[in-house]
Image (cartoon, coloured by chain):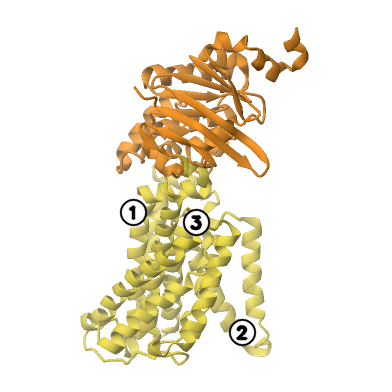
Chain colours: A orange, B yellow
Amino acid sequence: MAPLLSVESSTKRFGGLLANRKVSLAIEAGEIVGLIGPNGAGKTTLFNCVTGYMHPDEGRIIFDGTDITHTRPERICRLGVARTWQVVRAFGRMTALENVVCGALQRTNRIGEARARARELLEFSDLRGKDDMFAATLTLADKKRLEIARALATRPKLLLLDEAMSGLTPMEVAAAVRLVRRIHSEMRVTICVVEHVMEVVMPLSHRVVVLDYGVKIADGLPQAVVRDEEVIRAYLGERRAAR
Amino acid sequence: MARIALAIGALAAVVYPIPLQLQGTTYYQTVGFLVLLNAMLGVGWNVIGGWAGQFDFGPQVFFAVGAYTAALLYVKLGVDAWLGLLAGVAVAAVICAVLTYPLTRLRGHYFAISTVAIWMIAQPIGATWEYIGAAQGLFIPVRPRTGVAASALALQFSGPAKAMGYYYAALVLFAITLALMAVVERSKLGYYFRAIRDDQEAAEGIGIDSRLYKVIARSITAAVFAAAGALYAFWALSVFPEQVLELNWGTLPIMATVVGGIGRLWGPVLGAVILIPISQIMSTTLGTGPLAGRGIDLIVYGLIIIVIAAFRPTGLLSLPWSRWFRVGRQAIA
């Protein structure tokens, strides 16, 4: 069976900088894939290319049998890809409920139905009782949960989480990890998480892909990836790797 | 509390011209007409400016499109005013959609500038296009009607009841606009407009076509402006470029919206009820007498707007009215 998402030799340049160089990556339906790498490795660029905010200069991106290399974000969402943002982008002057309703309206035109779905998702995302709070007034952890609820409301097949756990306290991180696991098991959504906190990605992911300077340097089981020479060099530097 | 205020306001709006009519002071009915016209324009502008968050400083173009379309159909083909008004609404919405789609590539200040540019382009077109009367414009001949119903259907009121007739015509159009916009606010459109305002990228990420919905928002605004323009044409009995393409048809409703409360359905209504009478009173009091002709009325008017903008940038409707009136509510309960 063809993978749900396949990125084929995608290259993205910003002037002289190669943000992604011939990156190939396949995500099978039902997986949780961790995408890691040091700052500036090109993780977010890859996300932007997959979700249509940028288009690769070379290579192809296929989602669920459709070539989405040059497709706009709203079309890609309709095909079943949803994402969250490294820097949260909640609709600040709308309530939490309204934020999620906007996502739910992707799959229905009836406001009543969208509101009911949104309430369910707020509850699912541990935001019970915060329906009528303006998104701008929520804590960072709640805003991140709200973004996830809003993304889920579009009924994605693939959910891309861009650093959904950075900036959170250890307790909030644990709650976020639980939420990601529940999305995977209860909603049967395929998930790709970008993170640079190894401790979060390793236990959560079925498979880990490592980017460094725009190039994929490892792709495999978490246990194998942490022992990979190149990965250690990228994360810890030459001296540690030599030892 | 809000319901009681609403009921009182609606009642006041309906009975307002009657004592004036009995008394014979029709001037204040005309002030009422202008309040309703600007309130309606403000409610329309709120769609693109308040909900969709796109600063449109050229909506007066569509006021002119509505006025010209209705006047042309009446003068050249003898089409009734209300049909002409509907045609003006349709023409304005289509022209707006065609003009706005390319503009939606621009964002922020650049979008705002481009809307002004379109207005600037419209002015020489209006002043030189012979078919629409060029600089002289069009004159709408009065065909006297007998009876209230015939006058109302033709949107032509004359004689002592003229001011009252147009007041009620404006009230009807205003009420229809407000009701329709209330529906839009609660629909998918209302949610999508506000999503784009708050974060365009995030909106696109959940499947919202930002360019399409900006075009829809501005076309709704254009439709409201065109309806008001058509009504204004039949009230003024003439349409010429300097009159219907005047900047004030854009700035007054925008100021009313900002002063009353941008992004709130009733904001522009409150703003128009406050600003338009003040401007009229200023020009009839400070604009006459020893200080006449020195623009004192405009200075004072400008100061009032600056004070409101400085102390309550989110508008008067955003003041904690419900807290202030809580005593009253408990007394009722």
Residue B178: percent from left, percent from top: 37, 61
> Which residue, given by chain and number where applicable, does mark 3 sit on?
B50
Q: Nearer the viewer, mark 1 or mark 2?
A: 1
Q: Dot 2, crowdedness within 10 Å: few (<14), some or many (≥20)?
A: some
Amino acid found under the numbered disc labelled 3: Gly
> Which residue, given by chain and number where applicable, does mark 2 sit on?
B287
**Which of the marked residues, 3 or 1, is nearer the chain's N terminus?**
3
Camera-nearest residue between B2 and A152: A152
Amino acid found under the numbered disc labelled 1: Val
How far apart marks 2 and 3 lie (CA) works out to: 33 Å
How far apart marks 1 and 2 lie (CA) works out to: 41 Å
Would you say residue A126 is visible in this rendering?
Answer: no
Discs 3 and 1 lie in a common subunit:
yes
The tally of labels here is 3
Element under disc 3: helix
Q: Check whether the beta carbons of the residues at disc 2 and disc 3 lie within 8 A of each other.
A: no
Quadrant of the snapshot with the C terminus of chain B? top left
> Which residue, given by chain and number where applicable, does mark 1 sit on?
B183
Camera-nearest residue between A57 and B1: A57
Amino acid found under the numbered disc labelled 2: Gly
- Image mark 2: chain: B
Element under disc 2: loop
Would you say residue A183 is visible in this rendering?
Answer: yes
Q: Dot 1, crowdedness within 10 Å: few (<14), some or many (≥20)?
A: few
Residue A188: percent from left, percent from top: 37, 21
Residue A178: percent from left, percent from top: 49, 16
Q: Check whether the beta carbons of the residues at disc 3 and disc 1 lie within 8 A of each other.
A: no
- Image mark 3: chain: B
Camera-nearest residue between B16 and A229: A229
- Going 67% across and 28% down the picture, which residue do you hit? A39
- Going 53% across and 39% down the picture, which residue do you hit? A58
